[in-house]
Image (spheres, grey):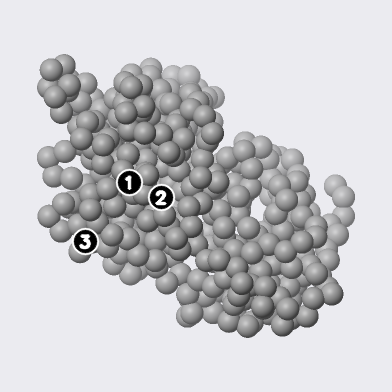
Amino acid sequence: MAELELRSGRLALEDGTIFRGEAFGARGGDSDGEVVFNTAITGYQEVLSDPSYRGQIVVMTAPEMGNVGCNPEDDESPRAWLAGLVVRALSPRFSSWRGRESLSDHLARAGVSGLAGIDTRALTRKLRTLGMLRGLLSTDESASDADLIDRVRATPGLAGRDLVREVTAREPYPWSEPSWRHAQDAALLPAARHHVVAYDFGIKRSILRRLVDFGCRVTVVPAATPAEEALALAPDGIFLSNGPGDPAAVPYAAEACRRLLDSGRPLFGICLGHQILGLALGGTTYKLKFGHHGANQPVMDLATRKVEITSQNHGFAVDVASLAGRAELSHVNLNDGTVEGMRLAGRPVFSVQYHPEASPGPHDAGYLFEGFVGLMDDWGRRPTIARRGA
C-alpha cells in the first residue's frame, strides 16, 4: 500500500471563512458546491457514489474516514458525483478484507478533491447556524484568501438548477441483480412476478437491488422519459427515484408524474421522487436551512406511531399545507416536523422523503418495498377492463 501524500488545501465559504487543511484525492483545480454536513458514522463510499450529492461538498461529522478503504461492490452508481469531501482525520491506511483501494486513491480516480485535518465540528456548527453555504475547495497556493472568497461568491447555488439531467441514464436498461444476501442464497430470492418501471432521477443501485429482492423485474428509464413511453412498457408499478437538486427545476418530471397518476397504476416515490409527486399533485416545495444528510434521522409513521431511524439526503422538502385535500401526511421527521411521507386516499400511491434501502444506514423502513409489492399484487387481481379504464 503506497504512502498517502497530502498537500496543502483550503476550503473557502461564501461568508468569508477560510478553513486550512491537507488536500487528498484529485490533484489541481478548484471544485465548488453547496457545503452540507452528513452525520453517518460510516458509509463514506456510498455517499461518494450517490448521485443525490451532485453539486455538493460533503462534510463528514464522524472524526475518522477511510479506515476500511473502498471496493467496487459498495458503489451506488458508476462514479463519484459529489463536488468534494471534507473530513477531520483521513486514515493513512485502510484495513478490510473487502478493501481494494484507499479513499484518497478512490477519489483521485474519480476526479474528486478532498480536504482533511480541519475542525469539522466548528464547520458543522457554522452550517447548522447559518444554513447551507456555497464553498470552494482549492489547492491553488498562488491565490490569496480574498481571491478564493471572490471565486466562491461567483458560483451558483443549487436552487433552480436542473442537476437531474447530469446524473440520469442516457438510455433505458434492465436490472435483475439482487442484494448480496439474496445473491448468495437463491432460496431467499422470490420469482419475479411484477414489472416495475423506475424513473432514474439519480437512482442508487441498492434501490434496484431491493426491488429485485421483493420479486420485481426492473426497467430503468431516463428522467425525461414521457409517461406514454413508460406506460408502453406495460409496467405493474412505477417507481420515482432519488436524485439531486431542486425539484422545481425538473418540471418535465412532475408533468410525466401527473400522466402516470392518471393510469391508476401503483406508484412509489422516494426522496426527489417524493417531492416530484408533491409537485405533480399541485403542491409546492421549499429549501431547508441545512437539509437532512445522514443515517440517523428519526421518523414517525403516523399510522402505527412507530419510530424508524432512517437514512436521508435532501436539501428540499414538500410544503404539507400546499397539499391539503390532495394527499394525506403519513410520516413526519421528529427533529423538525417536516414531511417525511404521504399517500393518496383510496389510490395505490405513496411516497417517503427518506431512503428505505439505506446503504448506508439502518433497515427499519424495508417494509415500504413490501407495501409497494402488495399494491401491485392488488392491481394484478383487478379485472383487465377495470385496469384499462383506470
163 over 259 or under it: above or below: below
Q: Give the SS element for disc 2.
A: loop
Badge 3 element: helix
Distance between the Cα atoms at labels 3 and 1?
Answer: 15 Å
Judging by the rendered image, the residue that carries numbered circle 2 is 250
Residue 373: where, in percent of width, then height?
29, 30
What's the residue at 57%, 60% (across, down)? Answer: 56
Instruction: Give the residue at x 34% y 52%.
Output: 275
Q: Amino acid at mark 3?
A: Ser
Q: Residues within 10 Å of mark 2 (few under 14, many from 20)?
A: many
The mark tally for this picture is: 3
Is the Cβ of the residue at disc 1 closer than 8 Å to that at disc 2?
yes
Q: Which residue is mark 1?
A: 254
Tell me what residue is drawn at x 50 percent, y 26 percent. 173
Q: CA distance from mark 3 to mark 2?
A: 19 Å
Q: Disc 3 marks which residue?
A: 322
User: At label 1, which amino acid type do we have?
Assistant: Ala
Query: Where residue 305 sits: x, y (%)?
Result: 21, 56
Quadrant where the image shows the C terminus: top left
Camera-side residue of 219 and 177: 219
Q: Is residue 215 visible?
A: no
Q: Is residue 362 above or below residue 39?
A: above
- Nearest to the eye among marks 3 and 1: give it: 1
Q: Residues within 10 Å of mark 3 (few under 14, many from 20)?
A: some
Residue 21's x, y, as percent?
A: 75, 72
Callout 2 amino acid: Val
- Comes first in the chain, label 3 or label 2: 2
What residue is at 13 percent from the left and 44 percent from the top?
A: 345
Of the image marks 3 and 1, the number of the one nearer the N terminus: 1
Q: Is residue 283 left or right of residue 40?
A: left
